[in-house]
């Protein structure tokens, strides 16, 4: 890629007005934004979100494709920039560049059963695929969502998951590692546990994973034990993106950059990249 290959429009942030801002957990803040024009993103893509004069960071898009210029993000408080973002309120503005990354192609999922496995904040990017899949049940097969977090207080999109659980085409399993003596209406355990009990049509099932790196090895082992091949497992890596256009090398995995070739990969593509899941 040469500098002439870069669309100049993705290098300049568009200022998005915040329609809604609220804390979802002690660490995560939800933002509903209005851009001056359509974003035209695919599920699984990300944007570079910024505050002028402070900096920018890659943030996963957590809503399905839209045509009205609206965008939803979930931002974890993890440093000086995101701490400043957590102070933003409705009516304030945030810079947005993108969308970036490979994303998911909905056509690949048509007619298939889909198993989503999310760990912690991994549910935010997966929601961008879950929402359009559940919105058109006739296009897709059975949907299973397994979502885990450390404690009930860490769960994101709780009301949304409870709504998904009421849909006839979806099975939703919500887990925590420890209830920490708080009320909890889900299950206790790791996200790997429910996989052994699933009814899986190996020839017609795709799995989609997003979560902490330690999760992938064990979830993939469970899926492989059920006969699911590596070509039918997608991983959303969300790994250290910085520029969004493959120029800085910060997110490089062996010979590929996560911000361009990823963050969505088939597991079969990652087998030759030993740095991918470390």
Image (cartoon, rainbow, N blue to C red):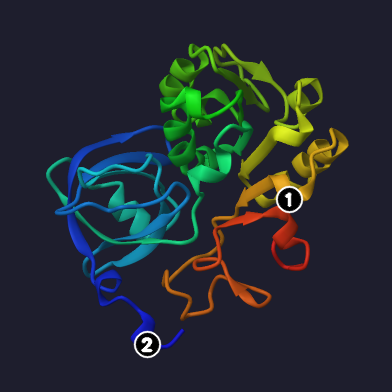
Label 1 crowd bin: few (<14), some (14–19), many (20+), radius 10 Å: few
- Residue 84: image quadrant is bottom left
Whether residue 23 is visible here, answered yes or no, is: yes
The answer to whether the residue labelled 1 contacts the one labelled 2, judged by CB atoms less than 8 Å apart, is: no
> Residue 3 has which mark?
2
Image position, residue 8 (x, y; %)? 26, 77
* Residue 179 on image: x %, y %: 62, 20
The picture quadrant where one finds residue 97 is bottom left
- Packing grade of label 2 (10 A; few <14, some 14-19, many >=20) is few
Is residue 147 depicted above or below 183 in this figure? Answer: below
The outermost residue toward the right is 225
The x and y percentages for residue 80 are 37, 60
Q: How many marks?
A: 2
Disc 1 to disc 2, C-alpha distance: 33 Å
Residue 231's tag is 1
In x, y percent, where is residue 221? 83, 42
User: Which is more foreground, mark 1 or mark 2?
Assistant: 1
Provide the secondary structure element on which disc 2 rests: helix
In screen coordinates, is 15 left or right of 161? left
User: Where's the C terminus, which quadrant?
Assistant: bottom right
């Amino acid at each position: 890629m040469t500098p002439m290959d870069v669309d100049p429009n993705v290098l300049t942030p568009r200022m998005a007005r915040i329609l809604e801002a609220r804390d979802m957990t002690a660490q995560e803040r939800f933002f509903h934004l209005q851009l001056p024009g359509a974003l035209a993103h695919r599920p699984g893509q990300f944007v570079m979100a910024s505050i002028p004069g402070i900096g920018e960071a890659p943030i996963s898009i957590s809503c399905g494709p839209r045509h009205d210029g609206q965008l939803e993000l979930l931002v974890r408080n993890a440093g000086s920039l995101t701490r400043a973002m957590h102070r933003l309120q409705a009516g304030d503005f945030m810079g947005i560049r993108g969308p970036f990354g490979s994303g998911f192609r909905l056509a690949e999922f048509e007619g298939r059963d889909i198993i989503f496995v999310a760990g912690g904040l991994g549910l935010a990017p997966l929601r961008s695929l879950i929402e359009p899949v559940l919105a058109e049940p006739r296009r897709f097969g059975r949907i299973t969502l397994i979502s885990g977090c450390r404690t009930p207080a860490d769960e994101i999109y709780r009301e949304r998951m409870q709504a998904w659980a009421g849909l006839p085409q979806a099975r939703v399993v919500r887990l925590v590692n420890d209830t920490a003596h708080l009320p909890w209406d889900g299950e206790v355990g790791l996200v790997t546990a429910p996989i052994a009990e699933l009814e899986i049509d190996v020839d017609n099932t795709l799995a989609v994973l997003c979560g902490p790196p330690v999760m992938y090895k064990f979830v993939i082992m469970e899926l492989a034990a059920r006969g699911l091949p590596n070509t039918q497992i997608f991983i959303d890596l969300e790994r250290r993106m910085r520029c969004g256009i493959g120029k800085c090398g910060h997110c490089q995995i062996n010979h590929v950059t996560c911000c361009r070739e990823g963050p969505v990969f088939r597991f079969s593509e990652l087998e030759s990249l030993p740095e991918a899941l470390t």
